[in-house]
Amino acid sequence: MALFSVFQTTFLLALLSLRTHQSEVLSEPLPWAPESLKVSINSTHQCLHLQWSVHNLAYHQELKMVFQIEISRIKTSNVIWVENYSTTVKGNQVLHWSWESKLPLECAKHFIRMRSAVDDATTPEQRFWSNWSSWEEVDVQNSLGHEPLFVFPKDKLVEEGSNVTICYVSRSQQNNISCYLEGVRMQGQQLDPNVSMFNLYDVAFIRETGTNIYCKVDRGDDIKGIVLFVSKILEEPKDFSCETRDFQTLSCTWDPGRDTGLLKQLPQSYTLFESFSGKKILCKHKSWCNWQVAPESQEMYNFTLTAENYLRKRSVHILFNLAHRVHPMAPFNVLFNDVSVTNATITWKVHSTGNYYTLLCQVELYGEGKVIQKHNVSVKVNGELVLSGLQPDTEYSAQVRCANANHFWKWSEWTRQNFTTVEAAPSEAPDIWRNVKSVQGYCVVTLFWKPLTRLQANGEILFYNIVVKDLDRPSGLQLLSVPAPANRTELTLDQRSYQIHVTANNSVGTSPASVLVVSGDPGDEEVEEERVKGTEGGFSLSWKPQLGNITGYVVEWCDRPRDPPCDLQWKHLGPNTTSTVISSDAFRPGVRYNFRIYGISTEMVPHLLEKKTGYSQELAPSDNPRVVMSNLTSHSFTLSWKDYSTESQPSFIRGYHVYLKSKAGQCHPGSEKAVLSDDSVCCKYKIDDPKQKTFVVGNLQPESFYEFLVTPYSAVGEGPHGAFTKVTTPDEYSPMLIRIILPMIFCILLIMILCYLKSQWMKEKCYPDIPDPYKSSVLSLIKSKENPRLTIMNIKDCVPDTIEVVNKHEGTGKSPTEPEAAKPTYLYLLPAEESYSGPGPCICFENFTYNQAASDSASCGHVPVPTKAPSQLGLLTSSENLLTALEKNCMNSLEEIPAGESSLNYVSQVASPMSGEKSSLPTNPPQPELCSEYKMQMAIPLGLAAPSSSGSSSLSSITLLDEGEHYH
Amino acid sequence: MQAQLLWRTLPSLVLGLLFLSMPAMGSCSDKYPELLGQLQKQADFMQHTNTLLDLYIRSQGLDKNGLKEHCRERPGAFPSKDALQRLSRRVFLRTLDTTLGHVLLRLAALEQDIPKAQDLEMLSVVKLNIRGFKNNIHCMAQLLPGSSETTEPTPTSPGASPSPTPTLDTFQRRLEGCRFLHGYHRFMRSVGQVFREWGKSLSRSRRHSPHQGLLKGARRMQLSGRNKRLMPRVQLAPGSHRGAPGG
C-alpha cells in the first residue's frame, strides 16, 4: 500500500513537471502546428478547399492529430463555422479538407484559420492546441470582371426540397436591383451595399431545363441570371431480385422508380456488388443486370445494388442461395400419345438443371376455353401423364409448366399443345317436335329436331334417319334420310296415325331413336287462351296436371311470331312437371308470344292442353286505328275502326279513348275533360271493350267545328296522340231542304224531258210557226165578242195589189250607215175586177214562190217554181204577167244583186208539211193540190194592222213575218 | 397537346419534303418563276416563330414576364432587310446560304439544351427545312446568268459563326439562343420580302419582255461584281467577319 502511494506521488510530480514544461512551450510554436495553409475555391460546388502540412513531423512519424478550423465571413470576427478535423498524420503529408458554403463564395469574403493538437482520445478535454495560423482571406469578387451585375451560384444542382441561397453582386451602389424566381419577385437580404442574398427554401422541380432565377437593374436593360437545376430525389430501387435459369447466369432485375428529371445534368448509374466474391459490375441498363455465376459453384450470393447520381446514393441488398432462385426454362417437346375416345397420354421434356434437382410440373387440360383438369407431376428429365375422362371427338388443349420441387421460386412459362379425341356414336336421341297442318285431306307434318350438342353427338353428325310407321298398317314403313345440318323435314301423310322415329348418325354409329306419333286428328281442339305476364327472365307458365298416362309435356312457341317462318321452338318437360319458365334471347318487348302446352301420352301422341299468350314486356300501343266517319248529322256522327287488329299491338288492348275537341270546350255526360300534351283541352270518351270498334259522338252543335282522335289504350298507356281529324257538323235545315229540293228538281227535270220529247206538239200548241187562223183563239174571241161579222177571208176575195220587193245591200263594202240602205221596189198589181177601186184593207195573194228553203237560201234560183200552179189554180187573171215580172225581177236580182243583198218580203202562206227540215225542201218541194192546203192570210183591219204602206213602210211588212224568217 | 404538335409538325414535314424534292431528284428546276415562288413560300414559312422560337422559349422557361422582353434580336446578328435589299442577287444568295449555314451550326449547339424528345424532333425538322432551303438557293444561283463562274455557296468563315462563347453560363446561353432564334425568324422574313421583290420585278419584266427580269438580274450582278468594294457590308454576327463574302 505504501508502495502504491509512493508511485502515485511520483506520477503526479512528473505530470506537473510536464504541464509546466508545456506552459513554457506555448509561447513558441508547437512542433506539430499546421503550416503552409493554402485555400482554393471551387465555384461550381461552392467549396473551399484547404491544404496544409504539419510542422516538424518526422518522415517516419505517424501521429493522430486534430485540426480545428475556423471560417469567418465578411470579416474575421464573424465566425460562421468551427470544425475539428481529426486524422492520422504521417511525416511530410499534405493534408486536405473541404468545406461547402451555403452562400456562394462569390458573394462575400471568407477568412480561414486553423490550429492543431495531438488527438488524445483518452483526455480530449486536455488537448494542448497549437497557435492559430494566420487568417487566409478568400475574395472571389475581385476576379469577377467588370460587368455591372453578377448572380450566383451558376448552374447549381440540387434536389427538390433543398434550401438554396442565391446572391447577386452589383458593381454600382446606385442601381436598384430586383430579382425574380420564374417571374416572381424575391425578397432578399443585403449583405453589404453591393451584395444581397436570397434564401430559397424547399425548392421544387419545375422543368427538366431547370429553374430560371434572374436579376435586373431597374430602368436598365441589363439582366443577369442563373439556372438552378432542381432534380427529383433519386429513389431506392424496388423489387430487386436475382434468379438463374441455367445455373450459368444470374439475372438481376429491379424497378428504378421515378426519373429524377435531370438525366442530362444528373446522370444516374447502377452498380451491382457481390460481397462474397468481392466483384462489382456497372450495369448498362437502369432496370436489369446480368451476373455470371462463378464456375466454382458458389452457393450463397450477397448482392448490393447501388443507384447513384451526383447528389445521392441509394443501395439495396439481397442474400440468397442460388439453388433457391431457379426459374426453370419452359418444358419442350410436348406430345400426345395413345389418343382414344376418352383418354390421351401427354409427354414432355424439361431442360436439364443438373441431376440434383427434381422439378414439379403442372399439367392443365383445357376444354372449351376452361380448365377442366389440373395435375402435378414430379419430373427429372421426361414427364408423362395419362389424361382420362375425356369426351369423344373433342378438341382439348393441354399446357405444362415446371418449377423447382425442393425450393419453389418461380414457375417456368407454359408450353401448350392441342389434341382431339376420337369419335363415338351419338349418345343421345335427337330432341324432336312436329307441326301438323291439314291440307286437302292430308296431314302435312313438319318434323323439327334440335342438333345434338357436341357432347351428345360424339362426332360430326352426317345425316338423320326418319322412319315413318303406319300404325294402322304395321307393314307400311317409310324411311327418309336427311343430310345434316338440316333440322327439319316435311312429311305428307294421310289421315291415319303414324309413328315417327328419328335418329342421328355420325361416321361411327347411330343415336338412340326419338319417337313421336302423329294422328289423323291434328288435335287442335278449341282451348281457351289465357294471358300470361312475361318478365325479363322469361314467361312463367303453369298448367293443370293431367290424369292418366302422360309421359311428359311439351311447351311450344315461336321465337319470331311476326316473321314467317316463325322459328318454332319447343321444350320437353317431365310428366311430373306442371310449370316451367320459357326464356329466349329472341324475346323482344312489345311482341306477343303464344304458347301451346301439349301432354304426351304413353303412345307418344301429343294433345293440346292449354294455350297461353303474353308479352315479355308490354309497350304502349304504337299506332292508332284508321277511323271511318259516317252518319254525320248536325248533332252527331259515327266513328268506326273495324279493320283495327288488336292482335298485332305491342300490348293487350283494353279499350279505346275517343278525344273530341270543340270550340265550346264543354264535355257532355259520358265524357270527361282531358288535357293533352300540347296543353289543349278536349273531351275524352272511354270505351272499355276492345271489341267495340264503333262509337257515336253525340250531343254536337250544328254548324260547329270538331276534331276527334281515336286511340287505343292498354295497361302501359295509350296510343300516340297524332293528328286529329277535323269535322264540321251541318246546319239543322239542310237535310230538310234537301228533302224538298231534290224532289222538286226531279219533277222539273221530268217536265223538261217531257217537254223536250213533246216539243213538236208543244210548238204547235203554244207557238206555231204559222198560226192557223181557224184555230186562232183570237179569232174566236173577236168573232164571239166584238165583230160577229168578221170571218175568214176567202181567197177569192183577195185581189193582188202590190208586191213589195226590198233590195238590201249587204256585203258590198258599203257602210251600213250610208243613207241608201234598202229601197223597196213596189210591184203594183192591177185589180182583177172592176169593183176594185183602191187599196183595200188587206191585200191577199197567192204565193206560188213561197218555200222555206228559198227563203233560207235567199236565192230564187235554187227553188224550183211550179210554173203552172197559177194557171191551175186560176186565182189571178193577170198572174202570168205578174209572175213574169216577178221571175224577171228575181232573175235580175240574181244577176245584178249579189246573194243576200236582195230579199223578197212577203207573207208566207204555205204551210209546208216539212217545215223545219230545210235540207229536204229543195228535193221535195211542196205540192199544193188544193186551196185548202194554203194557209190563208188573215185580213186585219187597219186599226189592228201595221200602218199603211208608203215609201218608207217596208218595216210594216216585216212586222208580219216570223222573226225566224227575217232576212235583211 | 399532341394534336397541336402534330398540327405544327405536319406542315413542316410536308414543306421539308418539298424542300428536298429537287435535290432528291438529282437536278435543279430550270423554271425560274417556279423556283422563286418556292423560295418565297419557304422563307415565308420559316419566318413564323411557331416553327422554332416559340418552342425554344417554352422549353427553356423563358415565357415569363420580365424575361421574354429580353429575347430580342441582337443588332447585327443577322443582316438587316435594307442590307439584303442592297445586295445583288448573286451576293444575296451567297449571304443567305452562308447565314443559314451558321444557323444550322447554332441549332446543333442548341440541341444540347433541349431535353424533350418531341422538341428535338421538331428541331430536326427545322434543320431539315433549312438544308432544303439551302439546296434551293443553290439551284437559284445556277439559274442566274453567269452561274457557271461561281455556283458553289460561300464557305462559312470560322469567325462568322454566331455561336456564343462556351464560357457563358446556362442562363446567358439560354438568352443568347433565344435572341439568336428571334433574329433568325426576322432574317427569314426579310429574305421573303427580298424574294417577293424579285417576283415583282419578274412580273414587270414579263409584261415588258419575258427574259428581261433575268437579264436585269444579270446586269445587276455584273454591276455588283464590278463595284463589289462599294457594296454595303453585312454584319453576320458579333465578332464575325464583316461584309458579304465574295460580294
Image (cartoon, helix red, strand yellow):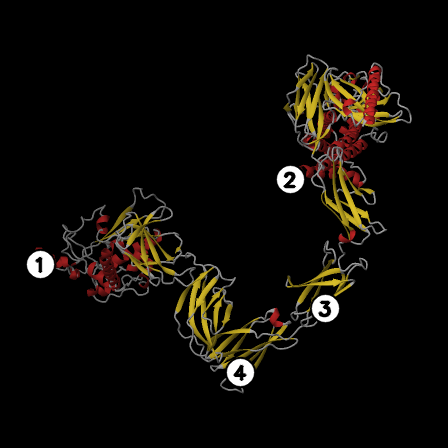
In front: label 1 or label 4: 4
* Residue farthest toward the right in the current orientation of the protein: A59
Q: Which residue is mark 3?
A: A345
Element marked by disc 3: strand
Q: In the drawing, what numbered circle is on residue B3?
A: 2
Q: Which residue is mark 4?
A: A469
Going by the numbered disc 4, the residue's amino acid type is Lys
Chain ID, mark 3: A
Q: Which residue is mark 1?
A: A784
Chain ID, mark 4: A
Q: Are marks 1 and 4 on the same chain?
A: yes
Crowd band around label 1 with a 10 angstrom C-alpha radius: few (<14), some (14–19), many (20+): few
The alpha-carbon separation of the residues under discs 1 and 4 comes to 117 Å
Q: Quadrant of residue B134?
A: top right
The alpha-carbon separation of the residues under discs 4 and 2 comes to 76 Å
- Image location (x, y in percent) of residue A587: 49, 62
Is the C-beta separation of discs 4 and 2 under 8 Å?
no
